[in-house]
Structures are given as C-alpha cells and as structure tokens.
Image: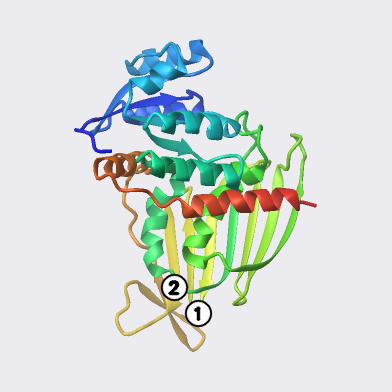
Amino acid sequence: MRYTPPVKISVIGTGYMGSLHVRKLANLDGAKLVGVWDIDKSKAQKVADEFGTKAFKSFDEAVGYSQAVVLATPSNTHGKLGMQIIEVGRNILIEKPIADSEDEADILIEFAAERDAILMVGHIENFNPAYIVAKKYITKPVFVEAHRLTAFRDRGGDVSVVEDLMIHDLELIPQFCGTDVESIDISGAAVITKKPDIAHVRMKYNDGLVVNLTSSRLSLSAKRKIRIFQKDAYIGIDFGERTVEIARMAGKNPEGKIVRLGNNKVEVIRPEIPKTDPLEEELKFFIESINKNKPVDNSTAVWAIKMCGYILRHSK
C-alpha cells in the first residue's frame, strides 16, 4: 500500500533497540514519528518526552494512528503482536529475530502478503558499511570463521546466545555460502543464565565448505568479525570497527599494495568504508520499500530462525 511521504511510524517497545529506533526516526527525512507505546507506561513516557513525541495509551492506539510500526518488543511476542499489526494492514519492521519459530515466521510473511503489507526484519548487519563494501570481493568461500563476542549485558538474557548474537551471522552466511548444509556439530554451555551463554557451531556443506561460528556473551572484550577464505584470497570483515582487509594473489591491475610472500606477489587491499549509520540505513530501506510498495526478501531471516531452532534442539 502506497502512502504520501512522510510515512507515519510508531514504535512499539521502548527498551534498548526501541529507543534507538525512536532516536533515528525523530530526525529522519521521509518518516514522521507519531508516537511510542510500551507495556511499561513510565518507560514509554520518558522516551516520548526525550524525543518530543506522544506516548500512546494503548497498543491499539499506537497501531491505529500509524501507517507503519517498528516492533521492538521481546522476541516471544513478535508472532502475536506482529499478526495484530499486520491484520489491520500496517507495514511492519520487526527487530530480529522475526519470530520464535520458523512456523511463526512463515505465517507472518504469508499474512503480510495477503494484507499487502511490507514486512521487514531488522537484521542490522546487512546495512553495516564494512559488509556492504566487502561483498563485492566474495566469490566462492571454502572456509568461513565468525566470532561474535560481547560482555554480559542486562538485555538479551531472556533468550540464548544463539538467538541473541549468533543469529546475526546465521542470517549473513546464506548470502554468500548458500544453504546446502550437509551436517552440523554443536556445542554450548549455560554459565550465567539458564540458556546457553556460549555456543560453537561447525557447519559442513555438501561441496566441502566449512563454516565455524562462535558466539559468547561472557567475553571481556567485544568482537564481531567474519573471516572468509576462498581460492587465492582472504577477506576479513570487522563489523565493530567497520574495517575490511583483503589479501589476494596479485593480478595485472592491482587495487592495493603489493607485498611479497616468498616467490608470490600478494595484493593487500584496505578499502575506504563510508561513514554511514546502519540503523539509519535500515530504516531508510524500510521507508523506501513502503513508498515503492516493494516486498522485502526475508528468506535469510527465516533460515536464520530455522537454524537457531535446530541448534538449540541439538545443543550438547
């Protein structure tokens, strides 16, 4: 459904991510922040006062006065609340994960298509400028290693580290590795919470590709890196520092610095990364999809939640 810009958007859930969305929407061209709602009314009012918007009295009021909704509530509410939002024809950006299960995700996507509503999942790393720059160098990986580590936080403890952190990498992996997974080895441990706080997953593909994923929320320092090895090349992406490093066999028209490794000439490229804000770019993409009435491909988000479910069911 098309609207005359700016798109009227409300934010439901004013926790950490919801507040970040409010901050961006309050100053974003093409969007009009119409208000916020949270089950904790005092929290919603505090956010509304800070950003000069309205704190709605009810969920229905927040949905009713908007053309699109950012849903940033706990993940176990995404299915139920998402259905209610879509049912009245509102466009929706759901913070990751899309839902609690693959079945719930499929229902949300099907329902959105029936109601001609744009549904998008907030996997923010897709808009990380380092990843966007690195993608053009990725061809056919033969080995991938991802580390996503953080110190323990007050938020996110209601789900496992797989759904909290590893899901980011699980959503990115099929974009350049595909989904033809032959086998999965899984290990994890609950240390502070009742759910896994540390997890390691090794996926082997039918063509021999190996993908290792490690996530922990008990680290002393943060780390968000993916290393990709392919024939004659290495690509390192640091999502936190927003840097990219490529090392590959030197060709006829090198982009970067040439160094010698024994008898081999190796080209090292450290491309310039644009100073864009991933959350702002994500919201711009959502608004553009609404304005163009162009459905968003959520297939990798669904695959990620499917893999999360498999990993948690088979954790040792």
Tag 2: amino acid:
Thr
Quarter of the image where the N terminus is located:
top left
Query: In the figure, 77 relative to 40: above or below?
Result: below
- Residue occupying image coordinates x 53% and y 55%: 225
The residue that appears at 34% across and 71% down in the rendered structure is: 256
**Disc nearest the viewer among 1 and 2:** 2
Q: Is residue 272 left or right of residue 97?
A: left
* Residue 182: assigned label: none
Q: Position of residue 304 (x, y in %)?
A: 56, 52
Q: What's the residue at 37%, 32% (across, down)?
A: 89
Q: How is the image coloured?
A: rainbow
Return the residue found at the far front.
Answer: 114
Residue position for label 1: 231
In this view, which residue lies farthest toward the right? 316
Seen from the viewer's position, the closer of residues 44 and 212 is 44
Q: CA distance from mark 1 to mark 2?
A: 9 Å
Decide which of tag 1 and tag 2 comes sooner along the chain. 2
**Numbered circles on residues, count:** 2
Neighbour tally class for label 1: few under 14, some 14-19, many 20 plus, Cα within 10 Å: few
Please provide percent x and percent y for residue 283: 34, 39
Comparing 58 with 266, the one in front is 58
Q: Give the percent coordinates (x, y) of residue 27.
A: 28, 28
Q: Position of residue 249 (x, y in %)?
A: 43, 81
Above-or-below relation of 101 to 28: below
Residue 149 appears in the rendering: no
Q: Which secondary structure, mark 1?
A: loop
The residue drawn where x is 35% and y is 42% is: 277
What residue did someone put label 2 on? 139
Q: Amino acid at mark 1?
A: Lys
Q: Are marks 1 and 2 in contact (CB under 8 Å)?
A: yes
Return the residue nearer the eye: 133 or 305.
305
- In the rendered image of this protein, does residue 36 appear above or below residue 285? above
